[in-house]
Image: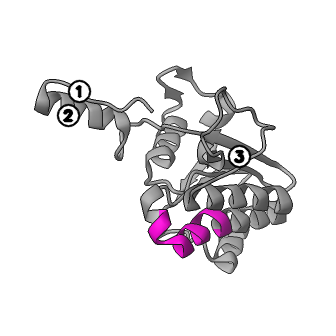
């Protein structure tokens, strides 16, 4: 089995790559099927997901059985300032991978976000709740989900929030740093 992981230098992509290559995670071993897989990790320099012809050629060449797409422009404030870039990466990138996955019969695992909702709910969201994004980030990730649904017949969409990992910036690392520096914490609870 061949697995392609996009965004392999990002927080989630690097962790997925490491777990599959190592054959285990903090919660236990991975499936024996994954242990024998050929895993290809690419970042934006190795695979520009915003370019359809590049993506199609690359995917035809490596023939993945599974494409995992954690690649994204996740800087929420940055997306507001650079909506075109957010659209290219979060929406067109997902579309391009969906088209390429369909061409070779690969399954696509599209990583999305809870930002596809407006955050105004008073109970946990369910997969069938109607999305209503209010930010450019959420709107472009939702469009990416829709492109995946439109262009690929074998897909999974995973909506997540609050990623924590060993690499990159995240809430846990920030809290630990502030606690060491200040000796106390002040955290918003909204």
Q: Where does the image place residue 94, in percent across and percent down from the top left?
A: 68, 62
Secondary element under disc 3, as helix, strand or loop, is loop
Q: In the drawing, what numbered circle is on residue 1?
A: 3
The residue that disc 1 covers is 185
Q: Image height check: is 28 above or below 158?
A: above
Residue at image x 49%, y 65%? 80
Q: Main secondary structure of the magenta part?
A: helix
Relative to 66, is 71 on the left or the right?
left
Secondary element under disc 1, as helix, strand or loop, is loop
Residue at image x 78%, y 58%? 146
Q: What is the CA distance from the residue labelled 3 to the residue labelled 2?
A: 43 Å
Dot 3 surroundings within 10 Å: few (below 14), some, or many (20 or more)? few
Q: Is residue 82 magenta?
A: yes
- For the C terminus, give its image quadrant: top left
- Residues at badges 2 and 1 in contact (C-beta under 8 Å)? yes
The residue that disc 2 covers is 178
Secondary element under disc 2, as helix, strand or loop, is helix
Q: Image height check: is 45 above or below 154?
A: below
């Amino acid at each position: 089995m061949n697995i392609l992981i996009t965004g392999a230098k990002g927080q989630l992509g690097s962790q997925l790559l490491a777990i599959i290559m190592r054959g285990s995670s903090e919660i236990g071993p991975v499936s024996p099927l994954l242990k024998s897989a050929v895993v290809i990790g690419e970042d934006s320099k190795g695979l520009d997901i915003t370019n359809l012809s590049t993506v199609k050629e690359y995917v035809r060449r490596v023939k993945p059985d599974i494409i995992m797409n954690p690649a994204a422009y996740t800087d929420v404030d940055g997306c507001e300032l650079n909506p075109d870039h957010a659209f290219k990466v979060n929406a067109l990138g997902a579309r391009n991978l969906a088209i390429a996955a369909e061409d070779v019969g690969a399954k696509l695992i599209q990583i999305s976000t809870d930002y596809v909702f407006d955050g105004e709910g008073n109970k946990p969201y369910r997969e069938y709740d109607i999305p209503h994004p209010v930010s450019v980030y959420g709107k472009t990730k939702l469009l990416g989900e829709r492109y995946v649904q439109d262009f690929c017949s074998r897909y999974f969409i995973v909506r997540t929030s609050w990623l924590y990992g060993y690499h990159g910036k995240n809430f846990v690392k920030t809290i630990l740093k502030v606690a060491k520096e200040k000796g106390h914490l002040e955290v918003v609870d909204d």
